[in-house]
């Protein structure tokens, strides 16, 4: 009976399969330790968010008439300030 000899292509395939298995194990271990509860950023006091959301909804309901409304202009200015400077709201 002849002894089994590993040819070069078989060795390369075994090494490739081993590397793929090693990469999959490393990826699964890494993903196991990643925190899944990414918190929602604090956007300021809830009262100011509710007031701003209510005002924006009112201005949206006004449609084109909101263009000349000073209350809508103030709400939009506050919304722009909050959007472009998110750290200032905290």
Image (cartoon, rainbow, N blue to C red):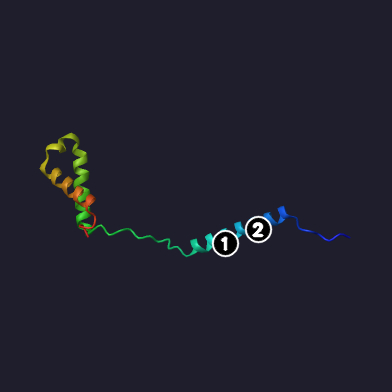
- Furthest residue toward top: 64
- Compared to residue 72, the image places residue 38 above or below, namely below
The residue where tag 1 is placed is 25
Structural distance between the alpha carbons of marks 2 and 1: 15 Å
- Is 44 situated left or right of 19 in this image? left
- Furthest residue toward right: 1
Residue 45, by quadrant, is: bottom left
State which mark lies toward you, 2 or 1. 2
Q: Position of residue 16 (x, y in %)?
A: 64, 55
Determine the residue positioned at 72% across, 55% down: 8
Q: Which of the two labelled residues, at mark 2 and mark 1, occupies the earlier sequence position?
A: 2
The number of numbered badges drawn on the structure is 2
For the C terminus, the quadrant is bottom left
Q: Position of residue 9 (x, y in %)?
A: 71, 52
Determine the residue positioned at 61% across, 58% down: 19
Determine the residue positioned at 60% across, 56% down: 20
Determine the residue positioned at 30% across, 58% down: 41
Instruction: Compare residues 70 and 15 and report the one nearer the observer.
Output: 15
Numbered circle sitting on residue 82: none
| Mark 1 residue crowding within 10 angstroms, few (<14) / some (14–19) / many (20+) | few
Q: Position of residue 37 (x, y in %)?
A: 40, 61
| Mark 2 residue crowding within 10 angstroms, few (<14) / some (14–19) / many (20+) | few
Residue 47, by quadrant, is: bottom left
Q: Element at badge 2?
A: helix
For the N terminus, the quadrant is bottom right
The residue where tag 2 is placed is 15
Q: Element at badge 1?
A: helix
């Amino acid at each position: 009976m002849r002894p089994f000899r590993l040819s070069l292509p078989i060795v390369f395939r075994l090494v490739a399969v081993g590397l793929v298995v090693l990469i999959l194990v490393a990826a699964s271990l890494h993903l196991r330790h990643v925190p899944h509860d990414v918190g929602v950023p604090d956007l300021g006091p809830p009262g100011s968010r509710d007031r701003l959301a209510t005002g924006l909804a009112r201005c949206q309901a006004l449609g084109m008439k909101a263009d000349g409304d000073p209350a809508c202009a103030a709400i939009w200015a506050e919304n722009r300030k909050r959007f472009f400077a998110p750290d200032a709201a905290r």
